[in-house]
Image (cartoon, rainbow, N blue to C red):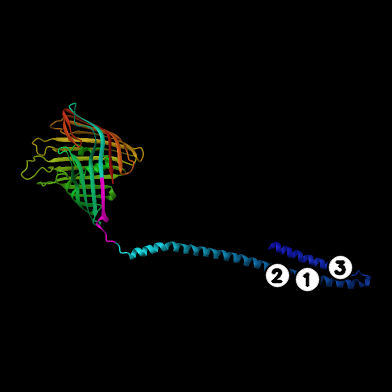
Amino acid sequence: MTKKMSLLTGAAMGMVLAAGLTAQAQAAPAKKHHKAAHAASAAESVQAQQAAEIEQLKAQVDSLSERLLSQEQQQAQLQQQTAQAQAQAQAAQAQVDNEIQRIPGVIDTRVASAIPKPKPSWADNTQVSGRMYFDLTDLEQKSNGAKVAPSGVGFDIKRFYLGIDHKFNDVWSANLTTDVAYVSADSLTQVYIKKAYLQAKLSDAAVIRFGSADLPWVPFVEDIYGYRFVENTLIDRDKFGTSADWGVHASGKLAGGLFNYAVSVIDGQGYKNPVRTKTMDIEGRANINYDNFIVGVGGYTGKLGKEVQNGVATPHTANRFDAVAAYVVPQFRVGVEYFSASDWNNVTTVVADKSDGYSVFGSYNFTSQVSAFGRFDYVKPTKDTKPSEKDAYWNIGLNWEPVKIVDLALVYKRDKIDNGSLSTSNGTIGGTVEGTYDEVGLFGQFRW
């Protein structure tokens, strides 16, 4: 706009100058001195006329400048309105596109609501799970230096559990878990009911189970240990405890899981043999989980299901004290378990006896799939009646977890009993002098 105004002003000044020159050219030179006054008056008139014309031209220039400025403002306003209209049109188009995309979902929802929903079935709140422990190994068992059965090479299924869980509502649920195991005395594979209970979950702090269910100690330590498919934990391996029994079981978590407890009133002979006795046994546990540390204590007292009507005398009561301490993080775990028992195998004998033992275990995860582990157990099963008898067990292995439901481990394990025989989860091992058990091979589990 400034450039245009400069051009107009220049043109106007040019016209004024031209008019002045023309007027001067047309004026006749003065002939006489007496005509000077008349000429001066005429020149003043011409100058006045020229000044008026200049003012008129300036006014015209100003008018044109204002018109040009107004046109430019109008043009800018029009451009702004056009941009706003385009933005509004784009927003409207986006809204239309969004509504179009929602149409199929709205139609599906209305169609689904119009179709009658099937009634909830029993299977909707039912889950089926399973777990199998297996091995392919070379086993050498000796008694007093000589090989004995079951030495040899073979594939074995140690355990196969099949479980069904059903939830009735937020409080009531039920579980049935079967246990398949080979019984050497019968040379048959037998199916047992390991767990069969009705559960009432009143809160996280109060869960009640009626029937055969997990006992407070062995399953608790199995979770800490992490390699149950390779070997039973300490008291389960040497038959100073079991994992499940028939009775009433209570458990709970307090303070956000910082404190946990479990207590069971049970028959006393394990899940394979529900019996009716004069009294029932009690097993309990309390533990604290704090900042990756786990510390727990537990105990057992009772007649182990042997105080039956018209049965043999039971002069002693079996008692057991348990303790465990562990540190567990994703990278590694390390722990120690200890037990002390009195008259565990002497409920019906005149002679009393004591037993104790400990287990040290650990593992390290090189990757999310590969880990190394090891364990050592030492047990004195008959401290009073045969103090020289002892059991030393250890294992070492490398585990591979290709997927979360499968574990495959290369393992070597050895058990040595001195000065006696001991019933273990791997059978009866020992001799008058010693007995050894050496096994190497592939151990595994899969679960769903």
Viewer-proximal residue among 181 and 250: 181
Q: Give residue 324's position: percent from left, percent from top.
A: 24, 40
Tag on residue 63? 2
Q: Is residue 67 magenta?
A: no
Residue at position x 73%, y 63% in the image: 7
Q: Is residue 2 above or below residue 127?
A: below
Q: Give residue 2's position: percent from left, percent from top.
A: 69, 62
Viewed as shown, does residue 204 lie left or right of 330?
Answer: left
- For the residue labelled by badge 3, is the local secondary structure a helix, a strand or a loop? helix
- At label 3, the amino acid type is Gln
Quarter of the image with the N terminus is: bottom right
Q: Which residue bears the numbered disc 1?
A: 53
Q: Residue furthest left?
A: 310
Range of magenta residues: 118-130
- At label 1, the amino acid type is Glu
Instruction: Give the CA separation, mark 1 to mark 2.
Output: 15 Å
The tag earlier along the polypeptide, 1 or 2, is 1
Tag on residue 125? none
Residue at position x 33%, y 65% in the image: 114
The tag earlier along the polypeptide, 3 or 2, is 3
Q: Quadrant of residue 320?
A: top left
Label 3: few (<14), some or many (≥20) within 10 Å? few
Q: Which residue bears the numbered disc 3?
A: 24
Q: Is residue 345 above or below residue 89?
A: above
Instruction: Give the CA separation, mark 3 to mark 1.
Output: 16 Å
Viewed as shown, does residue 123 lie left or right of 433?
Answer: right
- At label 2, the amino acid type is Ser
Residue 411 appears in the figure: yes
Residue at position x 59%, y 64% in the image: 79
